[in-house]
Image: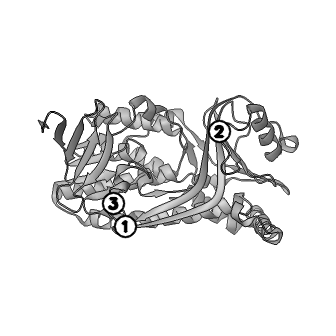
Amino acid sequence: MTESHNSHTLCESADVVVLGAGPAGLVLGVLLQAAGIDCVILERASRTHVQTRARAGFLAPNTVRILDRHGLADGLHLGGHRHGTCEFRTEDGRFRLDYGALGQGGQHHVYPQQNLVTDLLTHYLAIGGRIRFHTEALAVGDADSARPSVATREPDGRTTRWTARYVAGCDGRHGAARRSLPPGAVRHHHHDHGVTWLGLIAETPPSLDAVGYAVHGRGFAGHMARTADVTRYYLQWQRGTPADAWSEQSIWDELDVRMRAADHGPLQRGRLLERGVFDLTCDVVEPLRHGSLFLAGDAASLLAPAAAKGANLAVLEAEILAEALSDALTRGDTAGLDGYSDRCLAHIWRAQEFTGWMTRLLHEAPEQDRGSRAGSFFHAALQRSRLNSLRTSRIHQEWFAENYVGV
């Protein structure tokens, strides 16, 4: 429903306004639309950008179960592939963990996030879902009332005021949902792991049939397959150094050194399609609700990428929130909304703990702790001990496998 407010402002409404068209927002939109809930997704970027931005690509077993349950997994079953092996390369040699045969026997599905987003968006539109691209959410107002609102900037520069019963903030760490939380309404927990990565997408087939984690005195390096022709690489990076500071030749040479290509086989080189620098930080908002405003995905929590938990948490939170909103709007039962935050935070903190452990496993002392030779040696010795335990202890391996694929 659209109503002219004045020559520059429009007023529109929906029962649920969803901010952001990432995995959380799209899964939420699909489930609400399928339940007959009047909803709209507002996305500041273009459709092309949403469908092409490269993100994570490892989907946990529970994520696949959720997508299967709602008829959203056809694309990943056709275009993705199962994966269940990690290879660690260290100064003591290399070892592999067949994590898919450990723990509860869970494997990942490797499926680029942009492909999943495209599948979700196609499905959402096919069932009549409303989405507005190029629409920037500026602020959420009246969240502590029964009728919150969202102020947006339209593609033509005009402003729109959306009113709703509920607003779902799935628009990331810096989005309008988080910015609109009043001081003191929630607690923000932030931690900097003291590590920076250079993320790379290379136009080249994978160089090994496993996720590769290389621990080296010059810094971490990682190898993650995406498709038959595209591979994701990571290099631990000096904080503050631009992504384009090194030539492609220098980057490949450094990957060879840290991945110990001379000992374990060459890397297949190719054109670098994308580069990005990011600090390994994490944060959590607690609680995930302020009145009629709910947070999900990266708006709820941000994790360092060492354990690939972000997209999996987003899908889980979207399903929990969709069920709770449907109960509230169709049956007047608000128990699910009342328990939403506690339920999701239990999963978030579990993921944060394992991600922190994984970050410490793969890196020597954080940059701020490397000034002392004794301190640096201490951290390196702990890291080596952790890796040796993972290499030799079946109990440790079972724990790793369960947490590596769990959310």
* Closest to the observer, 134 or 396: 134
Residue corresponding to mark 2: 200
Q: Are marks 3 and 2 in contact (CB under 8 Å)?
A: no
Residue lying at the far front of the rendered structure? 7
Label 3 packing within 10 angstroms: few (<14), some (14-19), many (20+) = some
Residue 50 lies, in percent from the top left, at 43, 35
Which picture quadrant has residue 8?
Answer: top left
Residue 404 lies, in percent from the top left, at 59, 57
Q: Is residue 289 above or below residue 11?
A: below
Q: CA distance from mark 3 to mark 1?
A: 7 Å
**Residue 181 - label:** 3
**Left-right relation of 249 to 210:** right
Residue 102 lies, in percent from the top left, at 64, 58
Residue 318 lies, in percent from the top left, at 37, 52
SS at badge 2: strand
SS at badge 3: loop
Label 1 packing within 10 angstroms: few (<14), some (14-19), many (20+) = some
Residue drawn at the location 53% of the way across and 59% of the way down? 282
Residue corresponding to mark 1: 186
Q: Amino acid at mark 3?
A: Leu
Decide if residue 215 is in sight here.
yes
Q: Are marks 3 and 1 in contact (CB under 8 Å)?
A: yes
Which picture quadrant has residue 194?
Answer: bottom right
User: Between disc 3 and disc 2, whose residue precedes?
Assistant: 3
Q: CA distance from mark 2 to mark 1?
A: 35 Å
Q: CA distance from mark 3 to mark 2?
A: 34 Å
Residue drawn at the location 35% of the way across and 50% of the way down? 176
